Image (cartoon, rainbow, N blue to C red):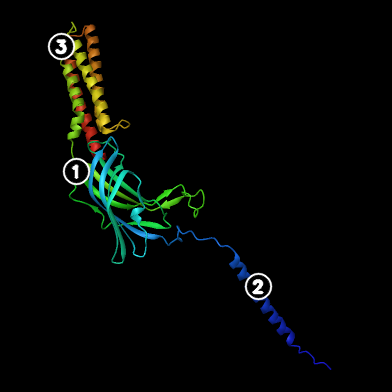
Amino acid sequence: MGKKESPHSLPGNIVLLTVVVIFIAVLSGAITCSALELPLPNASTPEKGKALGCIVGSYLTSIHDFNLSGQTFAADIWLWTHTSSESERRPLETMEFTNAKSTSSSLGNDIVKNGMRWGQRKICGTFRQHWDLRNFPFDRHKLEIRIEEAIDDTTALTYEPDSLNSSYSKDIRLDGWKITDFRIINNPVTHSSTFGDPALQPGSSSEYAGIILRIAIERKEVTSYIKLTAVAYMAFFLMLVSFLLHMDHSFRLLDSRITLQAGALFATVINMNSTSCALGSVDRITLVDKVHMVVLFYILLGALVTVLGRALLARGFSDHRLRQVDLWAAVLATVTFIGTNGFLLIRASHTG
């Protein structure tokens, strides 16, 4: 008789067969995955959280050439960066001065010192600035030099301001101006474009590292204000003089009075136009413009008093009473004009 098969051999064979099938399936899956073409990583954009940190500092050595009508100013600054000594990146070479009209760089240096890559260079440039002269001569301004990374977004490079070492030279002397503050501010810039970066979703935005150098200045002289408004104040004085040219029933001095007021009006209008051009404030109303407008108002008021006086004389008003009207008009005009100018000056000095 043939040998009888053991009843325990069948389950063992099933287990063995199952193990073999699983092994083959795993091996096949591994071979299939290795055969697939995987997407290549973007070399220009590292993983999130892997961005290179860059410390940026600045020292202001000179500020000059304030062009109020051209809306610019010039400055000379030293810039430096600190990055990892292992990094070959040169942040100073990819910085963009976004509000610059023109720039030039010199004295560049890039070395590894104390385990850190230290880059520095001197920048001389002319920068655009919105000069708000509404409160001239009590105006204060915050001049800005805007710096932005031009190549890599914040997933690859970030800025951190070196606030402790950033400052300005105390030897800077500005005619008629005083520097009141200097700050270096972190200012990442978001653009509503990917600039074609294939690593970003089409139609989305991108963010780039940015720094703002902010220099606060205030005006410390009033000579220029006196020069710009002297004609207006003289025109007001001529208007007051016209009140002393009293008319009588023969209408003597009427022509002289009207001529004097017309000349004051013409001089005020011409001077107002020239001062607006000098300040570059044609599209804005400044304190100087307000002073001229007040003078124009009083000159027109003086003309109305002249017309009224002629009408009163024609109706039989006495010469003596008309002279009293002229004198009272001159006094009231002087007091209210001084008060109005004082109010405008005080308000401008507190809001400048």
Q: Is residue 87 above or below residue 343?
A: below
Q: Quadrant of the N terminus?
A: bottom right
Q: Would you place residue 248 above or below residue 265 in this image? A: above
- Of residues 328 and 239, which is closer to you in this image? 239
Disc 1 crowd, CA 10 A, few/some/many (<14, 14-19, 20+): some
Q: Which mark is residue 25?
A: 2
Point out the tag, 2 or 3, that comes first from the N-terminus: 2
Q: Amino acid at mark 1?
A: Leu
- Return the residue nearer the eye: 260 or 339: 260
205 in relation to 132, above or below: below
What residue did someone put label 1 on?
174
Furthest-right residue in this view = 1
- Is there any visible trace of residue 181 in the rendered image? yes
- Quadrant where the C terminus sits is top left
Residue 232: image location, x then y, percent: 21, 25
Q: Nearer the viewer, residue 155 or 291?
A: 155
Residue 234 at x, y percent in the picture: 17, 24
Q: The residue tagged with tag 2: helix, strand or loop?
A: helix
Q: N-terminal of the two: label 1 or label 2? A: 2
Q: Is residue 315 visible?
A: no
Tell me where residue 191 appears, x and y as whole percent. Answer: 43, 48
Label 3 and label 1: CA atoms lie apart by: 57 Å
Badge 3 or badge 1: first in the primary sequence: 1
**Which amino acid type corresponds to the residue marked 2 in the rendered image?**
Ala
Residue that badge 3 annotates: 320
Callout in the foreground (1, 2)? 2
Image point (58%, 62%), residue name: 37
As helix, strand or loop, the secondary structure at mark 1 comes to: loop
CA separation in Å, label 2 and label 3? 124 Å
**Proximity of marks 2 and 3: CB atoms separated by less than 8 Å:** no
Residue 251: horizontal and vertical position, in percent?
Answer: 19, 7
